[in-house]
Structures are given as C-alpha cells and as structure tokens.
Amino acid sequence: GAGVSQSPRYKVAKRGQDVALRCDPISGHVSLFWYQQALGQGPEFLTYFQNEAQLDKSGLPSDRFFAERPEGSVSTLKIQRTQQEDSAVYLCASSLRDFLGYEQYFGPGTRLTVT
Amino acid sequence: SQQGEEDPQALSIQEGENATMNCSYKTSINNLQWYRQNSGRGLVHLILIRSNEREKHSGRLRVTLDTSKKSSSLLITASRAADTASYFCATESNTGKLIFGQGTTLQVKP
C-alpha cells in the first residue's frame, strides 16, 4: 500500500523566503509527527498531531515555524523568513494509533536548502 | 536535543560478520526503537522493545535493553552488503514523540 509521501522532495529557497512543506500520511493514521534532521545527525522532534489537534509543538525552533493539519489528514509545515540554519531534511511520520508503542512510518523527507 | 549517544559512530565489517551497535539514553522510557536509514531514503522501523522486556529477536536482529544502565544494543548477525546504512535508536516519550540518538553508520563490505 501507499506509504507516507512528502512534497516537494527538494526545495531551494533564498534567505527570507517562506516555504511550505507537505505531508500525506498513511490513510487512517491518527498520529502525525514532524522531525528535522541536520546533516550527519539523528532526527529531532518538531511537532505532533493527533487527528487535527496539535498536541505538542515543543520542538519548533522559533515562531517562524508553523504546522497545521486542518482535516486530520494532510499536514503542512510552514517556515517563514527562512534562514540558513533552517537547511535540513524535514521528515514526516505517521502512526496508526494515538497511544504509545506503535511504530512510526516515515516519509522520504524534504531536503530544504536555504541560500 | 538528542536523547543520548550511540557507539560506535561508524563501523566497517566484512559480509557475513556480526555487527553490534550500542545506544545509551538519559531519561526513563516507555519503549526503545531501532530504525535504519539508507542513503537518500527515509527511516525504516526495525524493532521495538518495551521497557519491561530485556531481549527481543526479529530475523537476523537481536536487541537487548538494560533499563538499569539506560542502554540498549542492536546485533545484526550474518551481515549483508544490503545492511549498509545508518542505524538510530530512539526512545519514546510519554507524549509519543521519538527522541533519536546520533546514529551509527554501518558499512558492510562484500
């Protein structure tokens, strides 16, 4: 079946531009997560949705980062006024249930380069 | 910030040999998971071990967990060239988010 998809796969933005990254989770998955992965590092948590509710946004690095999942399915991560330090791979993951102990299925990521 | 450290950072072995990677973490956990990431691809879940389990097997994978030492190990037996990848341990917090280590890069030479 279809896995988690993300678009675009690659994005080059000039510093100061706004970007929007899209995540299509596996159909029926309740939980959706966003992670940021810098080169050579493990992914770092950004935010978590349970259906349309954003339950945890403690990992968002600044108020330039905003995420939404208005209908409990597709999610968008928006970065305003991009900075060079925002360059990273942004990973989206979904999970079937809203409680612990279920594996997360990751998308291929969006590689963002800010020039 | 990352949860803990993985050791070694890089590992190079011959096909057929076993590979062992270690992971340490800092806080109490609900479970610990191991993921693999191939170059240019997303993360793939390998195995999950709950905090009340000490050892778990899945195919050629064996995971141990020592909650008193806050550490885990992943053993891959009879390695293959296709096992070449980065391996990450991740602990699951009470809110469900995963906290990843920095990863071990494994190279299996044919």
Image: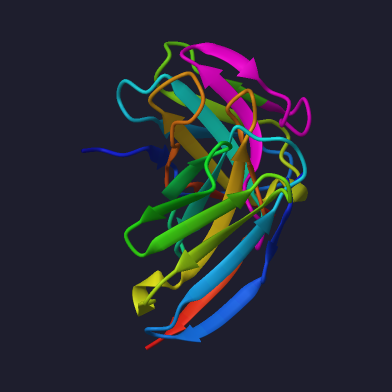
Question: What residue is drawn where x is 42% and y is 43%?
Answer: A107
Magenta-span inclusion, residue B108? no
Q: Residue B63: x and y, percent?
A: 50, 56
Question: What residue is drawn where x is 77% and y is 25%?
Answer: A63
Q: Say if A80 sits above or below A91 in the image.
A: above
Question: What residue is drawn where x is 46% and y is 13%?
Answer: A51
Q: Residue A62: x and y, percent?
A: 78, 30
Q: Say if B8 sits above or below A58 in the image.
A: below
Q: Residue B22: x and y, percent?
A: 63, 63
Question: What residue is drawn where x is 76% and y is 44%?
Answer: A83
Q: Which residues are magenta?
A: A39-65
Q: Is residue B78 left or right of residue B34?
A: left
Which of the 4 image quadrants contains residue A90?
top right
Examine the rendering and report whether any part of residue B102 can be seen.
no
Q: How many marks?
A: 0
Q: Say if A46 sits above or below B62 in the image.
A: above
Most foreground residue, A106 or B16: B16
Q: Is residue A102 left or right of residue A112?
A: left
Image quarter hosting the N terminus of chain B: top right
Examine the rendering and report whether any part of residue A88 can be seen.
yes
Q: Residue B9: x and y, percent?
A: 67, 70
Most foreground residue, A10 or B16: B16
Which of the 4 image quadrants contains residue A23?
top left
Which color mode does the image show?
rainbow
Q: Is residue A26 left or right of residue A14?
A: left
Most foreground residue, B12 or B37: B12
Magenta-span inclusion, residue A57? yes
Most foreground residue, B40 or B4: B4
